[in-house]
Amino acid sequence: AGIFDSILIHMLENVEGKQGWQSLRAEMCQALNMKKNERTVEILRTAYSDVDVMFLQEVANSFAKLIENDSALGEKFEVVVPNTSGKRDQNSIILLNRNVFDASSIEDVTDKIYANFKEGIPVAEGDVLAIKVKSKDMGKGSTYLLASFHGDTNGLATIPVLEVLHTFIQENLKDETVKFVFGLDANTYENAKKGKTQCVKEFAEYYVSLGMNSCHGTTPDPSNYTTYNARTFLQTQLNKACTREEFLTKGDVNPKDFVLFYDKEFSSSNTFKDNTGERKYIERMVFPTLSFPSDHAVLYTELTAKSCL
């Protein structure tokens, strides 16, 4: 704590610059803390209100309420949240376009998924949301299993959770012709430590072995990052801080986010990332920024049902 305080004093006395540290600090606090939820809702409303499904992770109950109360998003989307949110209040949720899906048909099957987790899997309440829902499709709706998931920091729960979802479909939904779409923060790593963090290549090999594909394809590029940030020395966990030169090796620069589906059911196209809130991605730009408050990029893809279905 003493070292941290000394750094702050040094900045205030020697490196304030023209703007001044206090005014810069206030601007950052306003954008990344006090107004974070409002800006996030604005991005969803202005850039992504045309989508059919949104998979969101680490969502507080207050943010879900903010979406419901938004005049544009609340009218267009059904906000589906877990029955129990857990102590952390960080939940995986799903937004369904009411013009596409029949909200009255929603069946929450999350408890059935949790019931099949093996002991020791690092999954907390609120990390997984799984629902069955019918689309409208001119009165001939298809049935979908949609799941949203936030993986643990090391990504070690990601494969076990996918395994349980796959088994659940094979054992319970195979005769119902249910189409599966899974939006997740997999917390996978480009340069994983064996047994300690989940390698993105191993994750891809696993989902391909189940007959699945992703918006990044069957062999995702490990350098196609969806997180690009690092801890500075302006926070108390100095053991996690790094210099600019150490950014790529010590920072969180990884391909973490995916949309998964069965290869026989869908093909994906027009996939892109966004770290600006304007449906574009600036490579090698650190985020969050003052205009984009998330530490994960938005991931967008379009799925087309294959004709054999």
Image (cartoon, rainbow, N blue to C red):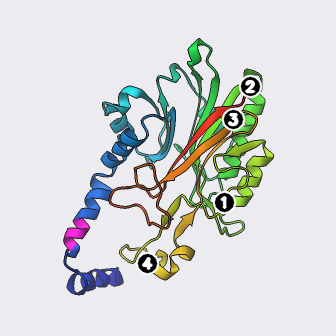
- Contact between marks 1 and 2 (CB within 8 A): the answer is no
Q: Which label sits in the foreground, 2 or 4?
A: 2
Measured Cα–Cα span from mark 1 to mark 2: 29 Å
Q: Amino acid at mark 1?
A: Asp
Q: Is residue 290 left or right of 243 when viewed as pictured? A: left
Would residue 157 be visible to someone looking at this image?
A: yes
Say whether marks 3 and 2 touch (CB < 8 Å).
no
Mark 1–mark 4 Cα distance, whole angstroms, equals 31 Å
Mark number for residue 69?
Answer: none
Secondary structure beneath dot 2 equals loop
Question: Which numbered mark, 1 or 4, is in the foreground of this view?
Answer: 1
- The three-letter code of the residue at mark 2 reads Leu
How far apart marks 2 and 4 lie (CA) works out to 54 Å
- The residue carrying pointer 2 sits among few (fewer than 14), some (14 to 19) or many (20 or more) residues within 10 Å by Cα, namely few
Residue 224 percent coordinates (x, y): 60, 60
Observer-nearest residue: 190 or 51? 51
Q: Tell me the quarter of the picture where residue 188 sits.
A: bottom right
**Cα distance, mark 4 to mark 3?**
45 Å
Query: Which of the two discs, 1 and 3, labels the residue nearer the N terminus?
Result: 1
Q: Which residue is mark 2?
A: 309
Which residue is more in the foreground, 272 or 100?
Answer: 272
Q: Which mark is residue 266?
A: 3
Residue at image point 71% right, 65% down: 195
Label 1: few (<14), some (14–19) or many (≥20) C-alpha neighbours in 10 Å? few
Q: Which residues are magenta?
A: 22-26
- Residue type at mark 3 is Phe
Nearest to the eye among marks 4 and 3: give it: 3
4 or 3: tag closer to the N-terminus: 4
